[in-house]
């Protein structure tokens, strides 16, 4: 109740699948803007808090203080028992808006390197703290007034500190979903986020979703065709996964050279990093820490300074 009185709610900023988001400001300082995310109550959870809301809360609290993760200032419940998250206000939209606005927004390899650096540091911090984000995609990468990209929307995030726990396989928006989840794996790791990071990387380069499947079956077919067919040879154990099915025509895994034509704008080191994020076998996929040690970051062009990054017009 006291927390609630610290903030004044303003106009609606947007509506998500399980929340409405409002602009707000601190009662004591009207110039300090915040976003108030009011989580919709789910009828079946009338007695307690919706699990989505509780997860978002728990993880944002654990991840406080990283420049590339949305900051949670406060939490309060309103009279209708809705849960309200007071979050950092990020007024410059999201990466999806920039990627899609091909006519007005121009960007190059240094800009992609800067955005990818911010995303990779955010994911590294999550994994270092035993949190999987599980829904990394361009529209969950919000942009701060100073150009910093911040990972948001922790509604699907969960911990992986309890390794014996069986996790649900129906997470991550289809286009960004890794093959182990499409095949129904229930013991998965930080590698699921890395695949999504690779999909964002590819999309930043070609400015359209790389593997936009309309169904799960189509998603698997696209992965097989564009990246390679998962088999016992390239991924020991894959055929044992409960939902394993692949098109009968087997495509060998493409090498770096095959990506150079379409993704060469980030240079050969950039393509090397991209290919390592897209390893079919999650055990062979690069980790966030290894990504940060990659040579690409130190190759020319340097990452653009955040204040010089392109922004929405
Ligand atoms: P979704 O459920 O679609 O992922 P959210 O529920 O997180 O989205 O947010 C809905 C909309 O509210 C977003 O598309 C965005 O326009 C706006 N929004 C969310 N968080 C913020 C924020 N911290 N600052 C400014 N706008 C935000």
Image: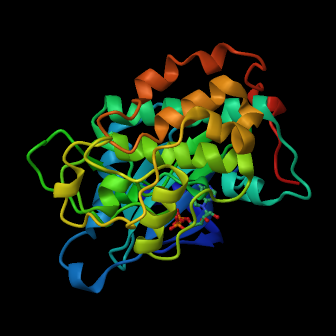
Name the residue rendered at 44%, 41% in the picture: 194
Q: Quadrant of the N terminus?
A: bottom left
Name the residue rendered at 59%, 48% in the picture: 200
Q: Viewer-proximal residue, 310 or 4?
A: 310
The percent position of residue 81, horizontal first and vertical second, equals 32, 75
On screen, residue 109 versus residue 166, left or right, reads right
On screen, residue 24 versus residue 207, left or right, reads left
Q: Is residue 29 visible?
A: no
Compared to residue 69, the image places residue 8 above or below, namely below
Give the residue at the far right of this rendering: 104
Name the residue rendered at 50%, 39% in the picture: 69
Q: How many marks?
A: 0
Compared to residue 84, the image places residue 305 above or below, namely above
Compared to residue 204, the image places residue 283 above or below, namely above
The percent position of residue 203, horizontal first and vertical second, equals 65, 51
Q: Viewer-proximal residue, 57 or 156?
A: 156
Q: Viewer-proximal residue, 276 or 116?
A: 276
The percent position of residue 50, horizontal first and vertical second, equals 28, 70
Give the residue at the far front of this rendering: 249
Compared to residue 20, the image places residue 197 above or below, namely above
> What kind of colouring is applied to the model shown?
rainbow
Q: Quadrant of the C terminus?
A: bottom right
Q: Is residue 295 visible?
A: yes
Name the residue rendered at 37%, 67% in the picture: 248
Give the residue at the far left of this rendering: 164
The percent position of residue 289, horizontal first and vertical second, equals 42, 23
The quadrant in which residue 264 appears is top right
User: Ligand 1 lies in which image quarter?
Assistant: bottom right
């Amino acid at each position: 109740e006291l927390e609630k009185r610290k903030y004044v709610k303003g106009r609606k900023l947007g509506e998500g699948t399980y929340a409405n988001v409002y602009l707000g400001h601190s009662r004591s300082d009207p110039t300090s803007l915040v976003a108030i995310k009011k989580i919709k109550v789910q009828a079946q959870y009338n007695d307690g808090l919706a699990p989505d809301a509780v997860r978002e809360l728990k993880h944002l609290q654990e991840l406080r203080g990283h420049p590339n993760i949305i900051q949670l200032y406060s939490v309060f419940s309103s009279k209708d028992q809705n849960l309200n998250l007071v979050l950092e206000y990020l007024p410059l939209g999201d990466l999806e808006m920039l990627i899609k606005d091909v006519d007005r927004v121009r960007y190059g390899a240094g800009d992609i390197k800067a955005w990818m650096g911010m995303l990779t540091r955010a994911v590294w911090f999550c994994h270092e703290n035993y949190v999987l984000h599980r829904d990394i995609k361009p529209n969950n990468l919000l942009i701060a007034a100073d150009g910093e990209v911040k990972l948001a929307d922790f509604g699907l995030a969960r911990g992986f500190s309890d390794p014996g726990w069986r996790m649900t396989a129906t997470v991550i928006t289809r286009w960004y979903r890794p093959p182990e989840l499409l095949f129904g794996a229930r013991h998965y790791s930080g590698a699921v986020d890395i695949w999504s990071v690779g999909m964002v990387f590819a999309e930043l380069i070609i400015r359209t979703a790389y593997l936009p499947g309309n169904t799960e079956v189509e998603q698997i077919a696209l992965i097989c065709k564009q990246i390679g067919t998962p088999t016992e040879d390239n991924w020991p154990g894959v055929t044992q996964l409960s939902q394993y099915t692949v098109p009968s025509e087997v495509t060998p895994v493409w090498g770096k050279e095959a990506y150079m034509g379409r993704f060469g704008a980030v240079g050969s080191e950039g393509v090397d990093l991209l290919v390592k994020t897209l390893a079919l076998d999650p055990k062979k996929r690069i980790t966030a820490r290894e990504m940060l040690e990659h040579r690409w970051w130190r190759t020319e062009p340097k990452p653009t300074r955040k204040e010089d990054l392109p922004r929405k017009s």
